[in-house]
Image (tube, rainbow, N blue to C red):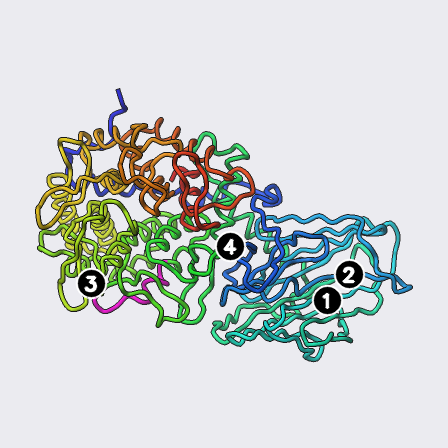
């Protein structure tokens, strides 16, 4: 006997509205401050040791923070201090390393290191270089989106010693040039008028620039090495499309008190982790699972890009590890925001705003947007999950002003679906496209090449809108939940009439979906072919979305769960693949078999909604224990193969990290 579902479906829709608020209720902000976490307890959760061999080297990865469009890595050899920078503006490494440090003795002999150690802490790169008489500890942090600080402290000093430090660095040929600009170094990139300025403390005198303007050296006068002495370099990034950030501290302030900024960095990351590691999971306090949550936070923050060019608010790349994910995508953004709000609420809000910045007059949200808005993709949009994200931001922050700000735009987007994606005006919508192409319509679903669309066709609505002749169950389930969110938000804003209207519409849509899209014979939810009015009898993750949104009756949900837990269908080694393993078309194709962690999250949340908490917990642990490299230093992947757990496609994928974090938190 399974546990009784906590919601009695005989009750009024108003109770459903109340229950829906529990879909992803987060711990409140006060609770998230209760943990005391030190980021230093999580060294090298991710491996960022690499040295680029050429300007275009996507095998190398880097660390960034604060929304910076540039990043650095730890070197994979002992020769360099920090690798990079890598420029996200054009996907190129400007050099192997532009900031390195060496020391000479009084006789001019270069001191040879006895040993080196590299560590990646959350939010900080550290290099410890041990010489016979002292150890130089180099830290690299981001102070702002345009400023990085390299700071060197000395320790383990046997006796006072005088040495001659030298900063040096170089860039790849043809990537720009290096010039001396008074007492600073200016690196001028060839593309987008990139400028990187190196500023040195202690009034360092630059007395040599090597040939071809591709390298520099910065020699200090003699320095007496003591525990109280230190060296610093500020790396300032700017290009013609950067947004001016007036809050950046002055160089003088940084040089006068570098430890203040190091401590700020420590506090910020300790706060991130203290909030993110709040969990309801009984196993969540185990270090191996905490490390997965920390890796998720690191992945999300590393993919954070600040407002730049035509991107008017901050947001996250899907991944910084490939050259084609250099923008913000719609349903990625909604998913990122739900995870971000648990530890970085202001960034979560901006992630929503950045997509709504480009909402058109009809109410449509672009599929993806770029720093060059002429490249924005208006061929399609993405599934309507922004209401879910906005509501989760509110439950975490109680920010009524944020609801008031976004509500009119959310209403406009919601109504757009019924005006431009409902062929027969029966209140069951279809995915579609703006150019009449099938491929763009498939993209609109987010499940680009899903088996259910193999025999779909496209129908013209007007000159710039086309729709599938196929009503999709996931789309309409999302619209159902969005109506309930709109109802609750209207109540918060004091509009009871509008709240009642959306509540009534949700109830009507719930009945339509259950009566028309649930197959009593097979016990599963399916799309409908508009022409034949028959169910498209292909099973996929879309069939459990009515359980995720809590519109399914207990009886129907129980039958869907039977498929979800069936080891010949969806209960694989890594559960919840994008197609059941018994489908003849099951393969390694993008959405034709691989496991996507957003759909895993929706499935496990669905199980929890309907009382299958034991199964949900077991399946969550299967994911955490079996995904390739998740407990090691390997990156979080775009998707995974369900039969082995092997990672597939893109590394450092944001929405995978977002849903792993939510699964860890049991949100």
Q: Residue furthest front?
A: 584
Q: Percent x, y for residue 132?
A: 85, 50
Residue 231 in the figure: left or right of residue 43: right
Label 2 SS: strand
| Distance between mark 4 and mark 3 Cα atoms | 37 Å
Residue found 31% across the figure and 65% down from its top: 377
What numbered label is drawn on residue 213?
A: none
Work out how far the residue at label 3 is from the one at label 2, CA to CA, in angstroms: 61 Å
Residue 633, position in %: x, y? 56, 42
User: Left or right: where does residue 416 sit relative to residue 111?
Assistant: left
Question: Earlier along the polypeptide chain: callout 3 or callout 2?
Answer: 2
Q: Which residue is mark 3?
A: 436
List the residue tagged with mark 4. 302
The residue that disc 1 covers is 168
- Whichever of labels 1 and 3 marks the residue nearer the N terminus, that label is 1
Q: Position of residue 566 (x, y in %)?
A: 29, 28
The part of the chain drawn in magenta is 352-363
Q: Which mark is residue 102?
A: 2
**Residue most extreme to the top:** 1
Q: Earlier in the sequence, mark 4 or mark 2?
A: 2
């Amino acid at each position: 006997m399974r546990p009784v579902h906590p919601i009695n479906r005989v009750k009024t829709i108003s109770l459903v509205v109340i229950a829906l608020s529990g879909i992803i209720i987060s711990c409140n902000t006060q609770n998230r401050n209760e943990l005391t976490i030190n980021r230093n307890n999580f060294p090298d959760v991710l491996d960022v040791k690499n040295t680029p061999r050429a300007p275009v080297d996507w095998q190398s990865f880097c660390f960034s923070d604060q929304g910076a469009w540039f990043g650095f890595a730890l070197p994979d050899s002992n020769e360099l201090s920090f690798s990079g920078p890598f420029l996200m503006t054009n996907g190129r490494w400007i050099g192997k390393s532009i900031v390195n440090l060496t020391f000479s003795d009084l006789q001019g002999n270069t001191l040879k290191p006895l040993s080196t150690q590299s560590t990646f802490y959350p939010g900080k790169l550290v290099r410890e270089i041990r010489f016979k008489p002292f150890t130089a500890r180099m830290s690299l942090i981001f102070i702002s989106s345009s400023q990085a600080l390299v700071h060197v402290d000395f320790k383990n000093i046997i006796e006072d010693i005088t040495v001659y430090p030298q900063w040096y660095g170089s860039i790849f040929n043809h990537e720009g040039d290096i010039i001396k600009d008074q007492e600073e170094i200016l690196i001028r990139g060839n593309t987008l008028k990139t400028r990187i300025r190196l500023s040195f403390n202690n009034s360092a005198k630059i007395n040599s620039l090597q040939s071809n303007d591709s390298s520099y050296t910065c020699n200090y006068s003699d320095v007496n090495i003591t525990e109280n002495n230190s060296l610093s370099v500020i790396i300032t990034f700017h290009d013609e499309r950067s947004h001016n950030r007036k809050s950046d501290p002055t160089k003088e302030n940084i040089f006068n008190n570098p430890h203040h900024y190091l401590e700020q960095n420590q506090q910020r990351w300790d706060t991130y982790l203290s909030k993110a590691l709040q969990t309801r999971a009984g196993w969540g306090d185990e270090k191996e699972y905490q490390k997965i949550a920390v890796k998720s936070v690191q992945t999300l923050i590393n993919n954070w890009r600040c407002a730049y060019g035509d991107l008017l608010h901050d947001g996250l790349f899907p991944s910084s590890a490939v050259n084609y994910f250099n923008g913000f995508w719609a349903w990625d953004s909604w998913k990122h925001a739900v995870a971000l709000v648990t530890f970085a609420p202001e960034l979560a809000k901006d992630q929503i705003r950045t997509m709504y910045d480009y909402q058109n007059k009809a109410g449509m949200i672009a599929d993806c947007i770029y720093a060059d808005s002429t490249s924005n993709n208006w061929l399609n949009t993405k599934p309507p999950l922004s209401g879910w994200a906005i509501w989760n931001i509110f439950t975490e922050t109680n920010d009524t002003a944020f609801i008031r700000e976004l509500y009119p735009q959310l209403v406009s987007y919601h109504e757009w679906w019924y005006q431009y994606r409902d062929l027969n005006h029966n209140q069951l919508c279809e995915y579609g496209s703006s150019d009449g192409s099938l491929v763009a319509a498939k993209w609109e679903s987010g499940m680009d090449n899903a088996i259910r669309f193999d025999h779909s066709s496209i129908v013209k609505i007007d000159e710039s809108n086309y729709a599938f002749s196929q009503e999709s169950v996931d789309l309409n389930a999302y619209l159902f939940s969005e109506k309930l969110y709109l109802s609750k938000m209207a109540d918060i804003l004091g509009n009871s009439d509008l709240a009642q209207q959306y509540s009534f519409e949700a109830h009507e849509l719930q009945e339509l979906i259950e009566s028309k899209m649930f197959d009593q014979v097979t016990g599963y939810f399916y799309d409908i072919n508009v022409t034949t009015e028959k169910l498209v009898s292909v099973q996929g993750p879309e069939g459990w979305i009515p359980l995720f949104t809590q519109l399914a009756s207990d009886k129907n949900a129980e039958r869907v769960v039977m498929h979800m837990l069936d080891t010949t269908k969806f209960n694989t080694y890594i559960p919840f693949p994008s197609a059941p393993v018994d489908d003849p078309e099951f393969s390694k194709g993008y959405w034709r078999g691989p496991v996507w962690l957003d759909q895993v999250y929706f499935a496990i949340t669905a199980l929890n909604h309907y009382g299958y908490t034991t199964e949900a917990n077991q399946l969550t642990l299967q994911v955490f224990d079996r995904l390739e490299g998740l407990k090691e230093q390997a990156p979080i992947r775009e998707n995974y193969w369900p039969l082995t757990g092997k990672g597939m496609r893109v590394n450092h994928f944001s929405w995978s990290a977002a849903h792993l974090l939510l699964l860890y938190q049991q949100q």
